[in-house]
Image (cartoon, coloured by chain):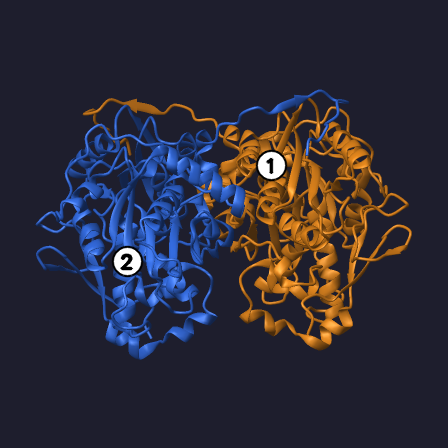
Chain colours: A blue, B orange
């Protein structure tokens, strides 16, 4: 019994394969690489019932993850986040089976942790001593913290506008932090020259092949938590799109393993903000790739990605599953954020809130039906975005003063 | 098979008993009440192996919790937080078995969630429509969010100095929020008159008997996660002290159930800040109760409690387990916070950091021995305390500028 059944890396664009036991970044053709496993061997070796007695982290699926030796696993207890049924919000939207996969309940408070745990573990196994990445905040924070535990130096470049708390996470982890007076694409150029000229490991989104493997575990977990049933619809706030790529990959792998019903795919919905909707624009036109979205802006900072390297994989996942792409307004997502808190008691991040705003619209349009099983991905804690909540009309008392309750 | 084996409430001071099927607050003698169960029946009905197949929330222990009917349970997926071994920090401190129970990985990002989930669930079962509480921030946030889900009105009074993010949590939950230009004791007086004059349910610490029951599950989990073994030492950041009271109660209950070795108790350590150390002062003098600590101050806001209602129960737990009480400086706790992040990748709250600062001192003094199993309770996320991290010397780049790595 091996810890991992990884076999090689494969380019989804040109089909070229690569060895996985040394550092690989993009394919020669410029495409991200995907990790492949000996799924037949996995099928012979374990079955889905074995998962019951596994630890409650994403490493429960270790045979389907890329790390060969357990001692290289860098874990802070990430994964198996709650999948919660939301009865009150469901009633409000006219849905009987609305769920939230709550990625706020994870170390670093964001789903970026999954990519960091798997990505850093594999980097450690490959002997990486120094990595660099551009970030809109949460990913950099997660990678810096996991890198600290792995004793890998992490150079993190983030826009001045990224959530301030994420700077502090990088800083307290002892990361090598730089701010940039620009966008994540500007940060990406800085990292690019660092990688080229100084031989640093490039941990940019999809430029290393392993964070997808961390993110795909969200797909495994949703299905396992639903009793190995595939939901009808999964909505995902889409910036770089790694989660949607990962979830799609997870579902296909589970089908090959025979752990879920053959043929049924969840309709994957890419949710974006109106202020940054390149995937939505491409999907509307039936395109296979997106175009750089000029002057992008949204308070949901994690999905302010004007052009994603993996856009073609995101669009492939949407088309193949008969999903869709939809953009929501800032007002709609902030309203959804309030509604989730006041009806269901969850203070979620604006990116996660966007998926609920999208559900509302898609239900009104009849694209989602009343009895369908619908999973919204909340990608992180509202706590990391204090500026999305503006307090109005709160009274300040002096000691000794009393409250008169108006009913 | 009943969902709960609760039988009654009991005063730990005068022994008077109370019915649990109606609203009860303090004992007539002024003491908090403790919840009692038919442990013999529980022992006949279930055993510790049954826990394996239970959901990963604190409700896995429902027979030992006070809610009769499962439909009254208000849950956001709280509990079974990670118990992590910290090898690098352990090596630094000269400890082979140092653990952190990480209460940051829980809805609302703080251990207060446990008390809120059990307290609100029982309040719902008892028909409460409106509650009020004073808070240093995290408890109010948790109770407001769970109250929202339970459709109970929550009036929350917090000092102006409480962490700002917690105001926003109360606000977005739709809570009835008041700020006060004073301390939590001033907030307590405001709530007191609201309760007396307007018949609102008093959810103040220990004035309702059920939050202890939520907190005690930390004790159950630590023991279960260690394979039903009791650790040698548990360190707990002590403000109101409900956690230490709860953990002590949990250990005694597990002994009565025969689920753990008879006789062995973990040495319980109450950790306070030098700026607010009433329990430490009392323990040093061998007193049974503490004295109000004048002009208290610490950045670890959650343990800025100058006089705790349950102080006598905290001290009893320390004496009975041969534990101790120790105060740490602000510098020491902030240093520990950095060390945990840079060695172990966890950004913890200052209250949790205080327990690590205490471990360092107690190890140096020989009070903790090299091979002992030591559990530090991190009570919440560092993310909720951005002001504890001050960033120095970070460079801001202009687009196109490059980084030169100095090795």
Of A367 and A101, nearer the camera is A367
Q: Which residue is mark 1?
A: B175
Q: Quadrant of the C terminus of chain B?
A: top left
Residue B191 in the figure: left or right of residue A47: right
x, y percent for residue A248 = 26, 59
Query: Which residue is under mark 2?
Result: A267
Give the alpha-carbon distance from disc 1 to disc 2, as whole Å: 36 Å
Residue A189 vertical placement versus A364 (above, below): above
| Nearer to us in this view, A32 or B203 | B203
Q: Which element carries disc 1, helix, strand or loop?
A: loop
Looking at the rendered structure, the secondary structure element under dot 2 is strand
Label 2 neighbourhood size at 10 Å, few (<14), some (14-19), many (20+)?
many
Residue B282, relative to residue B390: is it above or below? Answer: below
Q: Nearer the viewer, residue A359 or A225?
A: A359
How many numbered marks have been drawn onto this rendered protein structure?
2
Q: Residue most toward the bottom? A: A44
The N terminus of chain B - image quarter: bottom right
């Amino acid at each position: 019994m091996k810890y991992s059944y990884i076999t090689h890396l494969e380019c989804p664009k040109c089909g070229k394969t690569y060895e996985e036991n040394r550092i690989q970044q993009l394919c020669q053709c410029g495409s991200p690489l995907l990790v492949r496993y000996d799924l037949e061997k996995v099928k012979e070796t374990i079955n889905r019932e074995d998962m019951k007695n596994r630890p409650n982290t994403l490493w429960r699926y270790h045979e389907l993850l890329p790390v060969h030796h357990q001692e290289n696993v860098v874990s802070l207890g990430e994964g198996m986040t709650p999948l919660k049924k939301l009865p009150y919000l469901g009633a409000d939207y006219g849905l009987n089976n609305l769920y939230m996969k709550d990625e706020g309940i994870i170390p670093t408070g964001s789903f970026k942790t999954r990519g960091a745990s798997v990505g850093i573990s594999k980097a450690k196994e490959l002997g990486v001593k120094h990595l660099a990445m551009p970030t809109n905040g949460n990913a950099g924070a997660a990678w810096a913290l996991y890198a600290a535990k792995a004793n890998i130096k992490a150079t993190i470049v983030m826009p001045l506008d990224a959530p301030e708390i994420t700077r502090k996470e990088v800083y307290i982890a002892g990361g090598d932090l730089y701010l940039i007076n620009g966008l994540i694409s500007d940060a990406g150029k800085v990292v690019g020259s660092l990688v080229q000229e100084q031989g640093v490991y490039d941990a940019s989104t999809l430029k290393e092949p392993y964070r997808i493997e961390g993110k795909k575990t969200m797909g495994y977990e949703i299905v396992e938590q639903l009793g190995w049933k595939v939901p009808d619809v999964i909505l995902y706030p889409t910036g770089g799109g790694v989660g949607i790529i990962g979830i799609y990959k997870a579902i296909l792998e589970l089908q090959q393993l025979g752990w879920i019903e053959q043929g049924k795919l969840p309709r994957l919905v890419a949710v974006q903000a109106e202020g940054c909707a390149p995937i939505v624009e491409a999907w509307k036109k039936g395109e296979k790739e997106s175009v750089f979205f000029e002057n992008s802006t949204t308070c949901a900072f994690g999905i302010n990605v004007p052009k994603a390297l993996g856009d073609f994989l995101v669009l492939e996942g949407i088309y193949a599953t008969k999903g869709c792409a939809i953009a929501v307004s800032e007002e709609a997502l902030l309203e959804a954020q309030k509604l989730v808190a006041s009806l269901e008691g969850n203070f979620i991040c604006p990116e996660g809130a966007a998926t609920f705003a999208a559900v509302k619209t898609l239900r009104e349009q009849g694209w989602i039906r009343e009895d369908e099983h619908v999973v919204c991905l909340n990608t992180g804690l509202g706590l990391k975005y204090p500026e999305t909540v503006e307090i109005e009309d709160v009274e300040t008392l002096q000691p000794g003063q009393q409250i008169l309750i108006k009913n």
